[in-house]
Amino acid sequence: MGEDIIFQDLTEDNLSRFNAYDDHETVRRVELPNGLIGFIAVHNTNLGPGLGGLRMRPYADEDEAIRDVLRLARGMTYKNAVASLPLGGGKAVIIGNHRTQKNPDVMEAMGRAVESLEGSYVTAEDSGSGEEDMVAISLFTEHVTGLPPMRGEDVNYGELGGNPSPVTALGCYHGIKSAIEHRYKGERSLSDMHVAVQGVGAVGIALCELLKQNGVKLTVTDISQEGLAHAKEVLGDVTIVSPDEIYAVDADIFAPCAMGAVLNDDTISQLKVDIIAGAANNQLMDAHHDQMLSDRDILYVPDYVINSGGVICVGYEYFRKSGYNPMDFTFTREAMLSHVEGIGKTVSDILDLAAEKGVNTGEAADKIAEKRFLEGASLSTDANGEDQTNPDSEPDRIMVQ
Ligand code: NAD
């Protein structure tokens, strides 16, 4: 195909009827080969380029795709801000079946569309797109991350590339430890815990391994018999329950690691745990389910905070490759993992803030994110939004905690 792509930027008039519209900076509708349509949304770039994955799914129509891309791009602004990354929020979607309608021409056009945004959007994999698609896109734009490690050898970032799932699991592990500390005030420790894990896929199994190594009792479920067989092989002594039974397991912690909307009217009434802390995105079916959990005295660790290890992983890869480094990060795997360990501190700050202000944990997380990306607060502000940076340091420099 040729070099030109056909696109149109949607205006406020086009977008204001969507609830998920939040003054997004750019929403670009892109015409792709074979009649496919894609959208790229950049929500906010106050902290840096909007990074978020490329999702391909058979949306019912363009409105459904726009709604999703607006919501997801906004979510990435919050996630990246809370993860102390110098990144804003963006997302891309393609309307189509990723198994039958994806091909190199489509990825070339997406690559050119990403390039047309001149670095305000950085793409990565998401559901319906994978590492090989990012490689295809990388032929047409630099603004892509989540590439296989060997692709980076020539630019020496190999140790930062690759599958982010184990890093996401590591972030969850640190978040879980902080939630235990907050909930039990030192009276119980990780090794006393019984954790019910929903989904033993890429993140779930890696999380189970970390927990198991630390003496945690595990109950797991999955809809995939293959996944369960693998879990049994890797974990040895583990209790397996059916997918419907996982919500009512008499455990201390429920770790959703499969899919969204699992915390709803039906499931919350079944829960017997003290803490919810897992990797799945969009765990609350509705905003009011956060309140429902708090009414039942269940401590909910906001999903986008505890699962930010993956974006930290691909973020470091992008910084290293692009040379964009406003926070003077060190580009070693060790430094990236230490940033991921910081998720533990962030979780503590959020839980403390929620307790102190008497608000739900999701609200506390949003407040911290908004303080950072709306009011330009330093990325090292504490949970109350007080700036912890040294007043003598350079004024524009953003610091990591
Ligand atoms: P995955 O596809 O590898 O694993 C998901 C697992 O859940 C699969 O084994 C699947 O069979 C199982 N599952 C699906 N429906 C189920 C059900 N009803 N009951 C029980 N199990 C079910 O995905 P993943 O990469 O491990 O991601 C898991 C979740 O974490 C997703 O919500 C994803 O969006 C989120 N997440 C992942 C990352 C990452 O780095 N991979 C980062 C952030 C968030």
Image (cartoon, rainbow, N blue to C red):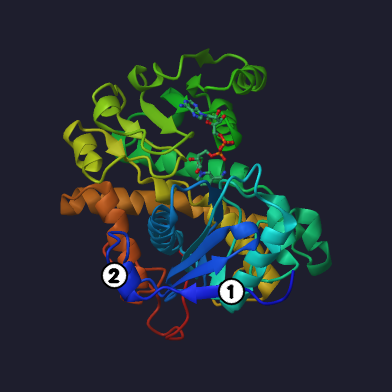
Residue situated in front as seen by the camera: 313 or 65: 65
Percent from the top left, x then y, of residue 356? 19, 52
Percent from the top left, x then y, of residue 285? 31, 39
Q: Is mark 1 on a helix, strand or loop?
A: strand
The residue under the point 46% across, 86% down is: 394
Q: Name the residue under label 2.
A: 386
Label 2 neighbour load within 10 Å: few <14, some 14-19, many 20+? few
Which of the numbered marks, if any, corresponds to residue 6?
1
Answer left or right for 338 relative to 89. Answer: right
Mark 2 → mark 1, Cα distance in angstroms: 46 Å
The residue under the point 52% across, 60% down is: 52
Percent from the top left, x then y, of residue 373? 37, 71
Of tags 2 and 1, which is closer to the observer?
Answer: 1
Q: Inspect this view and state whether residue 48 appears.
A: no
Answer left or right for 321 relative to 241. Answer: right
Count of numbered tags: 2
Q: Inspect this view and state whether residue 137 appears.
A: yes
Three-letter amino acid code at the position of disc 2: Glu
Label 1 neighbour load within 10 Å: few <14, some 14-19, many 20+? few
Three-letter amino acid code at the position of disc 1: Ile
The residue under the point 46% across, 51% down is: 343
Answer left or right for 258 relative to 232. Answer: left
Q: Is residue 281 above or below residue 204?
A: below
Percent from the top left, x then y, of residue 399? 47, 72
Task: Answer whether labels 2 and 1 touch (C-beta < 8 Å).
Answer: no
